[in-house]
Image: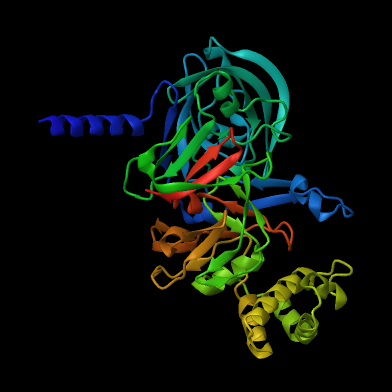
Amino acid sequence: MEIKILLASLVIWYITCINVNADDMVRIELKRQSLDLSSISDARIYAKDLRGRNRNLAALNDQIVYLKNYHDVQYFAEIGIGSPPQRFIVVFDTGSSYLWVPSSRCFFSIACYLRSRYKSRLSNTYTKIGKSCKIPFGTGSVHGFLSQDNVKVGGAVLKQQVFTEVTREGYFTFLRARFDGVLGLGFQGTTSGNITPVWYNMLLQHMVTKSIFSFWLNRDPTSKIAGEIIFGGMDWTHFRGQHTYVPVAQNGYWEIEIGDLFIGNNSTGLCKDGCPAIVDTGTSFIAGPTTILTQINHAIGAEGIISLECKKVVSNYGDSIWERLIAGLQPENVCNRIGLCTNNGSLCSSCEMIVFWIQVEIRKERSKEKAFQYANQLCEKLPNPGGKSFINCDVFALPHITFTIGDKSFPLSPDQYVIRVDDSQGVHCISGFTTLNVHPRRPLWVLGDAFLRAYHTVFDFGSSQIGFAESA
């Protein structure tokens, strides 16, 4: 009998430990929307490079503005603004810092009439600010003005949160969006001006006691619960093992440093010395440089575009590239030496990719003929920056794609990086990778939901680090 009592006590203790305590944590249940071919075809990720021509590479990270269009987002949750609360469906987005929703004063954008609009006159806690602002996105901007009101997130009510009432939305940018607005979970900085983000106010107003929030996406597509965000803690039932923590590289974004990426057991080599990666809950894809995504397309049989320009570089300059690499010339100097990048010529980007591909083949001790054959095959698999890459839905033979984070491997199986889309014509399978080109020798990655579905993620604001563990 005493043993039974002891076991019962242990069970009660365990349940108490894993459940979220409403006094110091806030749990947000996410809802899932299915992707369709039109939203995926519109999916773009952009990077505006603000560097001057004479800036050096060391300053690169401070000069990149990361933009996206939100057409492909899948996960949403409900918040309330005002007293009594007015309901809005928003994207919880670690890739931005603003909170914005459509305004009742949005008269001239069709998109505003298709979703909930904030009405300040109906709230008895509204405070007028009125300062105009513009929030940039990949294909344009939304315009509006600042207001202040109470914001309900889960069971917590933040007092007098500053947010943007949007009065003009881009026609093509948000017309088909399935959400009302965006709640940014990024860092306060130049992109958010002097506005205190929602997450900061949760800490300042003591809604949570721990300065972390965790993000879990349910891999079971049939479940009613698509995922959860827990502010102030984590749920131990959402992951297996221990988290691997890596420091945040800079406070503009939730940005970390990643290492080499493997296709199957083969190193791609481009990020051996490290590459920046933004961990972003507000996009469905994994974005990366064309140089690597072309190799991924080739390995997984994804459709690409045939580049005659790329093939021209192989046929006309391949021997010169090979000879200089064999002679020990640094890869970053080859295209300048053969005259393709001296005047920012149109062949320069193709040359830099081909130099990298041939260098990888040389390290594998492949013959020149084999290296050129591989480069030509990759020229036929270049990702279409404005489209999608279809894959055979029989994914069992496809290789794992593995990221290196904190000297630990984080593999993605084919069923994790292949996105299945159902429509009236049947089931389509699409690569979860899309292109984002910033700099040929220090590429920027974006780890979106295709990665986060596989790995439970802890955003540790207090220690300025991010942790990953296998999702349960």
Q: Is residue 429 left or right of residue 404?
A: left
Compared with 185, 202 (above or below) is above
Residue under the point 31% across and 29% down: 16
Q: Nearer the viewer, residue 366 or 182?
A: 366
Q: Is residue 88 left or right of residue 16?
A: right
Residue sitting at the far left? 1
Q: Quadrant of residue 168?
A: top right
* Whether residue 222 is situated above or below residue 411 in the rendered picture: above
The residue drawn where x is 49% and y is 18% is: 157
| Coordinates of residue 303 in the picture (x, y in percent) | 54, 71
330 or 130, which is in the foreground? 330
Q: Mark yes or no: residue 304 visible.
A: no
Q: Nearer the viewer, residue 287 or 107?
A: 287
Evaluate whether residue 298 shows in this view. Answer: yes
Q: Position of residue 195 (x, y in %)?
A: 68, 25
**Residue 21 image offset from top left, x and y in percent:** 38, 25
